[in-house]
Image (spheres, rainbow, N blue to C red):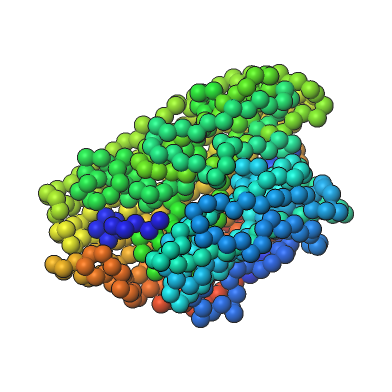
Amino acid sequence: MIMRRFVASALAAAFSFVPFLPFAAQAAHTRLPHDLTRRATHASARAARPADASRKDVGSQNTVTADAPVPRPAEKPCVDTLFSGATFAQYAGVPFAYAPPAGCPGPYAKIVFNGNFSVSAGIQFDRTASIQLGNVPLFFGTTAEPDTTLSPSWHVERDVTDDAALLASAQSGEADIFNIVDSTYTGVISGTAYLQFYPARGAFKAADTPQIVLPFPGVGGGPQHLNTGTSVLSATYALPANVERAYFDVYAQSQQTDEQYFLCAPNDVAAEFFTCGNTAFRETEVSIDGRPAGAAPIYPWIYTGGLDPYLWSPIPGVQTLEFKPYRVDLTPFAAILSNGKPHTISLSVDNADNYFQAIATLFAFRDPGKSHVTGALTADTLVPAPAPYESEQLTGAPPSVDGEIVVTNERRYEIDGYVNTSHGPVATAITGKLDFGNGQFYSNESALTGKTVVYQITSANTTTVTQGAHSLDISNHSVSFPITVSLSLVLDSTGTGTQVASIDQHFIEQTGEAGPNGVFVSYESNEVAPTDTLDILDDAYITGNANQSSSQTFDAYTSTGECYAQTIRAANNLLTSVKNGSCDRAAIARALRPVMAR
């Protein structure tokens, strides 16, 4: 996936479980009824494995992250292997068969997906990787790139407890890492994947999981292409008549000319900057029967071959090895989905140039005490398509063009609905805000010398109010995706010279929930910041690099006492330090106050 014209065109301690006041007294009562199983309770949040990075890795060039492990119950899990020692040396998926773990019946407190991958030393691109069961995604990410002396290996894991209904029966599975191995591209990818099932017993209660887990778009081959902004993926579902909650977990991955979409320019000047068109604005749109039902921001992932492959060795970018989906709440449409008719959910990426890959999962909860719920969608102010604002202030003539391009977008909406359930009427009101801003600053002296700096931030905030007959729950979820990219190119008349690249890539997620069962607050921050000087020959070949350095800082904590903090650093493509942060209860309490204030 590396951009071949990138030169000219682009120019922690392990979990600490000490409760902190004033939230510790509420730890046993923090999970709200409408919450899915994204977090463990305080009693169950124990790390079964440490973070990826440890001091023994210092001095290594092997792929390493500071990513937090999935919290797990402090008990021995049942392990169910999906596939072992599979090789990916062909442009085709690898099928496998799945059966629930023998002698380990549910319900479960937690289910965790684990993957261990490696690439043999040689020449190979980073590759998109996905694993599905019954066409439902268990994992989606990319692979690390090797070199002639390095065979990188890495571990990924993901909480898949919400997939419990899917995992309760035998399924056909497929691992899709489409790889080309020939006389030029020699790196062979290998992998093993398994599930850990943690039975619910004692202090570890059964997770509240959806009874319906369905694939989108429900076809084989993993994520599907959305070639342009008008391309649409759809799936039609005939759901039971008693759906009371529904959620849609969305992945949208940028590829090909859209790979670094944050560098894309308006169509009238894109050719001047040797970049993709349609501006830098991208957003995922979700609809039900043609009616807007939600929107999802798109994370600016950079893969290990992106812009400069030395930037990402040994520390890859934020979520590069494992993407996080964005959850769209479809609960206001529950009454419509329960009306006995088939309904079509559609997904598109606004402004896509070429192209995106997308896949999703539809989750639904059924009313256990009523076979048919009624209700209505009462408000939907989400417009079908965004209308971004563009501003160009450029001077000069190609290739000596200076100035700035700014693209912004702002969306505000409300979607409300209610269902008449066996426990009374339940109304759900969702207010959402999506904001996008991208500023591109160009200083191009010639076709061979210039500088591009891009500042982009994408943010999404949703507040959900759930009103039952005798309860009121309020939750807030916000994400922010800031990224800064600086590229300076200096070449001589033969196309030989250097590119200096600096990146600062960040992911921030905050949640706050309050209701009759108590209060829950969480915060996660993941930041990767590399820099490198790339040596270039004849405007076509990378001959080496210098002055490389990078760092990753991952912080996560909750009001129930979970805490994780780690910073890793690298220089000259070797890991130089691993520092585990402190989990001071007073500092965490102070940090969480702004989240609670939402």
How many marks can you see? 0
Q: Quadrant of the C terminus?
A: top right
Residue 344 visible in the displayed image: yes
Corner quadrant of residue 333: top right
Extreme residue toward the front, this view: 183
* Residue at image point 65% right, 42% down: 134
Residue 242 x %, y %: 74, 25
Corner quadrant of residue 289: top right
Picture layout, residue 578 above or below residue 135: below
Residue 551 visible in the displayed image: no
* Residue at image point 39% right, 66% down: 184
Residue 357 x %, y %: 47, 44
Corner quadrant of residue 452: bottom left
Q: Nearer the viewer, residue 298 or 563?
A: 298
Q: Quadrant of the N terminus?
A: bottom left
Extreme residue toward the left, this view: 397
Residue 543 x %, y %: 30, 73
Q: Is residue 252 left or right of residue 111?
A: left
Residue 554 x %, y %: 55, 62
Picture layout, residue 359 above or below residue 491: above
Q: Is residue 158 left or right of residue 461?
A: right
* Residue at image point 14% right, 54% down: 400
* Residue at image point 47% right, 38% down: 284
